[in-house]
Amino acid sequence: MNDFFTSGVLVATAASAIRLATPYLLASLGETIGQRSGVLNLGVDGVMLLSAFFSYWTVLQTGNLWLAVVVALAVGVIMGVLYGIITVFFEATQGISGIGIFIFGLGFSDLMFRQQVGTPKPVQRLPNVDIPVLADIPYIGEPLFQRSLLTYLAFALVPLTFLLLNKTTFGLNIRSVGENPQAADSLGVSVERTRFAAILIGNTLAGLAGAALVLQLGIFQPNLTQGMGFIAVALVYFGAWRPLGVMGGALLYGLVNATVLQWKSLGIIPVSISDLAGMAPAIVTIGALILLARRVNAPAALTKPFSRH
Amino acid sequence: MINKLLGGLVPFLAALVAFAFGAIMLIALGANPFEGLEAIFDGAFGSGERLAATAVKATPLILVGAGITIAFRTNVVNIGGESQIIGGALLSTVVALGLPDLPAFLLVPLVIIAGAIGGGILGAIPGALKAYASVNEILSTIMLNLMMVQFMNYLLRGPLIDPYELEAGTRIPQTERLSDNAALPTIVEGTRFHLGVLIAVAAAIVAYIILWRTPVGFRLRAVGHSPKAAKAAGINVKRNITLALAISGSLAGIAGAILVFGSEGQRMVTDGSAAGFTSSAGFNGIVAALFGGLHPLWTVPSAFLFGALLTGATQLQRVLQVPSSLAVALNGIIVIFVISSSRVRTWLQTTLGNTNLFSKEEEEEEEEINSTTEVTT
C-alpha cells in the first residue's frame, strides 16, 4: 500500500483517471442533453462501438487521426438521425429502441471488424498536448495539462453544456419539452424539432466518445466498450442531469477504474481477486443510484413520447 | 379491423426489412445474398442434426423471452437476462459439484431448480431496488450484468477452477467436468436435442398460465396496467414488481443451468466476456419476446426463428466467410423495426404504460393511455 502513496504513482493514477473519464464524460454530457429534452437513449454503447470501430479503421487505412475523429462524428450524426426518426416520429418506446441500437452496434461493429481487420492491430494513439507553462506545474501539471485534445474538449464541454442548457433559448426549449411538452407546444416550441436536435447532439457526442476511447487505447476489439455506454447513461442519473454533477460522476468513475488498475499492477490487489475488484465500478454505481434515486428529480417527461392528440 | 390485420403483419414486415438489410450487407461484403440465405436455411434446417441444433439454440431464448414477457406485462423492463443466466448457471454448477453422486432423477431436477433460484435472486435484487428504493431497473439490471461477468470470471479462475488446470498449469478458466448424473438426457438419439428444449417449452406454457389463468398473474398484469388502480384495489404493488422480476430472472436462470448441463462439455467455461458463455441470449431473448408480441406462447416460435438465424449464421460463416455477427446486427434492426411500428407501440402503451424511470407511478396521472389505445390481451 505504501507503494501507492508515492507522488509518482499518485500523479500517474490521477492522469489515468482523467484519461479514463474522457469517453464517459463525452457520452454522459450528450446523454444529459438528450434526457433533458425528455429522450432516454440507451443506445449509447452501440453508437460508441460503431464510432470506435470506424475511427479505428480510418486510422488503420489512412493514419490520419483527425480524419478518424471526423468519421466518428459522422457516425454519431447518422445514428442520431436514425434514433431521432425512431423516437420522435415513430414514438417508439425509448428503453427498448435504444437496446435495438445497442444490439445493432454490437453486431455491426463486430461484423465489420472481423471482415475488414480480423486480428487487432495497434494503431497510433492520440498524442498528448502540453499546455505551455501550466504543463510544468509540479504534481498537477501532468494529470491536468498534458492530455489529449479530446480530453480538453470533453472538460471544456462541461461549462458549455451548462451554458447551452441554462442560458440560451435553445436550452430553455430543451428543458421545457423535457418537463412539459404540452405546455411548450402550446407556446409554439416545436417539441419534435427540439428533441430531434437534442438527440442529434447527444449521439454526436457519443460518437466522439467512441473515438476518444479507441484513439486513447490505440487498438480495437469486438465489444471494446464492455458496457461503457450504459455506465455513461447511469452517470447522468448520478449527476442529477447537471453537467457539473455528470463531470463529478465521470471523474469518480475514472478514479475508481484507475485506482483498481494501479492497485492490480502494484500487487495491492492480488491476481486471485482482481476479477472481484473489477466489480467495484458497477457496485459504486448501484450504491450511488440507491442513495440518489429518491433525492433527485428526473425530467418529468423523460421517456414519454409526445403526440398532439 | 384493417389496423388489426396490419398489426399482425408487423413481425413479417420486420423480418422482410431485416432480410433486405441483411442482403444489402451481404452484397456490400461481396457475397451473394441468395447464397447467403440458402446457407442460413441449410445451416438451420438442413438436417435432423441441424434442426436439433436450432432447437437447442432457441432454448435459452424461449426461457429468457418468456421471462421478459412477464416482466414487461408488469410494466418493468428486464435487461438483466445476461446476469440472471450467469447466476443460474453458477448456482446449478455449485450444486452439481457438491452433490455429484445423487442419482440422475434427483440431480437433474435439482440443478434446474438451482438455476431458477440463482436467476431468481438476480431478478429479485433489481426488482426490490425498484420497488423499495426507486432505483431504475434498466440501470440496475445493466450494472448487475457487468458485475456478474466479473464474478463468473473470479469463480472460474479461482475457487471453481478445474483442479487439473491448476496441476497442468494451463489455467483455462473452466470447472471440472460436472457429474454425468446432472446431464440433461438426450431426447432424439444422435442429435443434441435434449430435455432442456422441452423444459423451455413447458416453462413458456407455465408462464402463459401464470399470467392469464392465475390470481398471481392477474395481480401482475393489474400492476402493469395501472399501478394506481392496482393499489386502490388492495394489490401490493411493490411486492408484485419484485415478484415479476424474480420470476423473469428465474426463467433466465433455468436457461443458465441448461446452457451448462445441456452442453457437450458438461462444464462451465468463460472467455472473460458474458457473451462467451451466454451467446448474448439475455439480449436476444428480448428480441424474441418482442417479435412474439410479448406473449409467452408466441415467444416459442419466435425464439425458434431467431435460433434458426443464429445457427444458420454459423453456416454462413463456414460457407461464405461472412462473420456470424451479421445475425446480431440483424437482430438489432428487427428490434428497432418492431418497436417503431405503431401496432406494437399501442401494445406497449397498454401493457407497459410509459416506462417510468423513478417508479413514481403512484403519483402520476395516466394521460394518453386512455385516449389512444385499444385494449388488447
Image (cartoon, coloured by chain):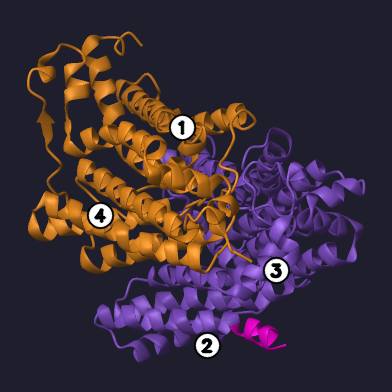
Chain colours: A orange, B purple
Q: Magenta residues, as a range?
A: B1-9
Comparing labels 1 and 3, the label whose residue is closer to the camera: 3
Q: Chain of mark 4?
A: A
What secondary structure is the magenta-colored segment mainly?
helix
Give a yes or no on whether discs 2 and 1 share a subunit: no
Gap in angstroms between the C-alphas marked 4 and 2: 46 Å
Residue at the far front: name it.
Answer: A187
Give a yes or no on whether discs 4 and 2 share a subunit: no
Give a yes or no on whether discs 3 and 2 share a subunit: yes
Label annotation for residue B372:
3
**Nearer the N terminus, badge 3 or badge 2?**
2
Give a yes or no on whether discs 1 and 4 share a subunit: yes
Comparing labels 3 and 4, the label whose residue is closer to the camera: 3
The residue that disc 2 covers is: B47
Residue type highlighted by circle 3: Thr
The residue drawn where x is 39% and y is 46% is A170
Q: Residues within 10 Å of mark 4 (few under 14, many from 20)?
A: many
Gap in angstroms between the C-alphas marked 1 and 4: 28 Å
Give a yes or no on whether discs 1 and 3 share a subunit: no
Q: Position of residue B45 (x, y in %)?
A: 53, 86
Q: Is residue B210 above or below residue B160?
A: below
Q: Secondary structure at mark 4?
A: helix
The residue that disc 1 covers is: A281
The residue drawn where x is 48% and y is 30% is A280
Q: Position of residue A252 (x, y in %)?
A: 41, 26
Q: Secondary structure at mark 1?
A: helix
